[in-house]
Amino acid sequence: MTALRLPSPGGGTRAYTPRAEPARFGTGGAPLASRTVFSAAHVVADPYADISPDAPAAVDWDATLAFRRHLWSHGLGVAEAMDTAQRGMGLDWAGAAELIRRSAAEAKAVGGRIACGVGTDQLAPGTHSLADVRAAYEEQLSLVEESGSQAILMASRALAAAATTPDDYLGLYAHLLRQSSEPVVLHWLGPMFDPALDGYWGSADLDAATETFLQVISEHPDKVDGIKISLLDADREIALRRRLPKGVRCYTGDDFNYPELIAGDEQGFSHALLGIFDPLGPLAAEAVRVLDTGDTKGFRALLDPTVELSRHLFKTPTRFYKTGVVFLAWLAGHQDHFTMVGGLQSARSLPHLARAYELADGLGLFPDPALAATRMTSLLTVYGVDQ
């Protein structure tokens, strides 16, 4: 393989020789046994749409659904219309609703597991009453349940702005849980992913917020399948996990510490609902199948080396991790272009993308390393990096 000239962190370029062969991961689609694993999935933009970044998203539905079939084929569940799909960062509620309908129908057709995000993003920016927020949640919950999907109650920017006390959260979530027809997943997304969610659960003090969160769950354990924690704090997740009522699962959303959290300890483990499993799908599924046999060391040997890539993609400002996720999907051949809804392909620098390419290539994530190198070369050329 011919060496590429990649940008160096301090300026200039350096030589990088891509690997000649991809890593070989299993292709079996049997359900994973020891852990429930969802990959949050990105959307594929329509590159031919003549729209501005702030216009409603134009989605390539065929490519978007094909990527979900890819994840299902490896035995992973799909967490749909979450922040990885650019909810609130290019994909509005109308687009998310269509995504939920189409993906849920596709999941039913192929026998794939799916859970979909329920939020309040149909509300216009600005101040809203708690009644407005509740009605928005109800509208989305109804659509998700009618689609046949499990619901994930996402953290709401509008609720964070409207609520003034922990009781506001307790009352609203109690209402939604009583109304849900099946157990839901509660999602706690930290401000590193969305600054507008600072102080969620009624306090910027995470210990106090945790108590409110646990009270919601303890008062309605029969309506909570599990919780998704995205705070990038392994110790806090473990402590919270140990306090959950029996039967309520913890789905890690920690893209910095997921191997140790999924592996668990003598007191328990986390399941997974992760954005990083979008680019890691086949490798992640292979690792969990190894864990299914009881081989924790083998699981860690496969998954631990991926953490450097994940921490790179999710580095500050974390909310722009979607750019790296879509970039790797393009290099891997899952889509024909590096275009994102909302023009978010511009959110990460060339050195950042080049390092993501290097790390992913080193892990053997690209089914066709030559294709990935060719596409990386084309991007470098656009940026004026001679090869």
Image (spheres, grey):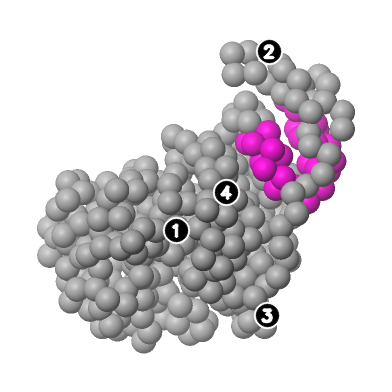
Sooner in the amino-acid sequence: mark 1 or mark 4? 1
Tag nearer the camera, 1 or 4: 4
Q: Using the image, tell me which numbered label, if any, was put on residue 301.
A: 4
At numbered mark 1, what does the secondary structure look like: helix, strand or loop?
helix
**Label 2, label 1: how far apart the Cα atoms are:** 40 Å
Q: Secondary structure at mark 3?
A: helix
4 vs 3, front mark = 4
Reply above or below: 244 against 92: below
Which residue, given by chain and number where applicable, does mark 3 sit on? 110
Q: Earlier in the sequence, mark 2 or mark 1?
A: 2
Could you tell me how far apart the alpha carbons at marks 2 and 3 are, in whole angstroms? 48 Å
Start-end of magenta stretch: 356-384
Which of the 4 image quarters holds residue 248?
Answer: bottom left
- Amino acid type shown at disc 1: Ile
Q: Earlier in the sequence, mark 4 or mark 3?
A: 3
Confirm or deny contact between disc 4 and disc 2 (CB under 8 A): no
Which label lies toward us, 3 or 1? 1
In which quadrant will I find the C terminus?
top right
Residue 293 in sight from this viewpoint: yes
- Amino acid residing under circle 2: Gly
Q: CA distance from mark 3 to mark 1?
A: 27 Å
Residue 324: x %, y % from top left:
60, 42
Q: Which residue is mark 2?
A: 12
Could you tell which of marks 4 and 2 lies nearer the N-terminus? 2
- At a point 68% along the width and 21% down the height, the residue shown is 7
Q: Earlier in the sequence, mark 3 or mark 1?
A: 3
- The amino acid beneath tag 4 is Ala
Q: Nearer the viewer, mark 2 or mark 1?
A: 1
Q: Quadrant of residue 28?
A: bottom right
Q: Position of residue 114 (x, y in %)?
A: 54, 74
Horizontal side, residue 311 vs residue 266: left or right: right
Name the amino acid type tagged 3.
Val
